[in-house]
Amino acid sequence: MDTKSALHMAYTGEAKAALRLKVYAEKAEKEGYAQMAKLFRVIAFSEEIHGSRALKLLREVKGTEENLAASFESETHVADVSYNQFIKQAEAEGNNAAVVHFSQSQDVEEIHAKLYKEAMNHFMEERETTYYVCKICGYVSDGILPDECPVCSAKKDQFVTFD
């Protein structure tokens, strides 16, 4: 294995660990273990630092315009190719919960791609907006807090505001 492959594996592993630990922290918090939740969040933050350093060493962080274009391409590929395959597999296995998850995620990935495309078109304007993210499925609304999520039907109190 070469160093680039090792850095990519480290980045991937650290990113997965950070997300997993954040989910563990949410669970610990719900179960009343505030200190365990704090520990999970602290270590998740540390793992994010490790992943960020590996990503930077891979030289995958470019200028904002290039990062927008790469993000758009990635979201488009994931929505068009990966999730289609995931949905077909889950359908073949009769796993309806996974079909719903993959279908909703695919819809949201398409919205992410649209948001990136819009940002690329308005890059020089640096238009300010407020985003609203559904905590259930990840749907992102640009500037308008919906009464109900158009992807999963969650109510408006299930959205997080990003000013």
Image (spheres, rainbow, N blue to C red):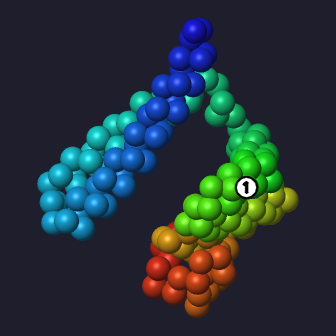
Q: Residue 102 at x, y = what percent?
A: 64, 60
Q: Is residue 108 visible?
A: no
Who is closer to the viewer here, 105 or 10? Answer: 105
Circle 1 Cα neighbour tier, 10 Å, few/some/many (<14 / 14–19 / ≥20): few
Q: For numbered disc 1, what is the local secondary structure?
A: helix
Left or right of 43? Residue 160 is right
Q: Is residue 68 above or below residue 160?
A: above
Residue in front for this viewpoint, 101 or 32: 101
Q: Quadrant of residue 49?
A: top left
Q: Is residue 139 left or right of residue 135?
A: right
Numbered label tally: 1
Disc 1 target residue: 88
Q: Is residue 140 above or below residue 66?
A: below
Residue sitting farthest toward the top: 2
Residue 115: x and y, percent?
A: 74, 63
Q: Which residue type carries mark 1?
A: Lys
Residue in the image at 64% along x and 34% along y: 61
Q: Position of residue 99 (x, y in %)?
A: 63, 63
Q: Is residue 38 left or right of residue 92?
A: left
Horizontal relation, residue 81 to residue 48: left or right: right
In percent of width and height, residue 163 lies at: 53, 71
Quick one: quadrant of the N terminus?
Answer: top right
- Which residue is at the far bottom? 147
Residue located at (44% from left, 34% from top): 14
Identified at 23% across, 63% down, the residue is 29
| Residue at 54 percent of width and 21 percent of height | 7
In the picture as drawn, the residue positioned furthest to the right comes out as: 121
Asked if one can make out residue 58 in the rendered structure from this viewpoint, the answer is yes
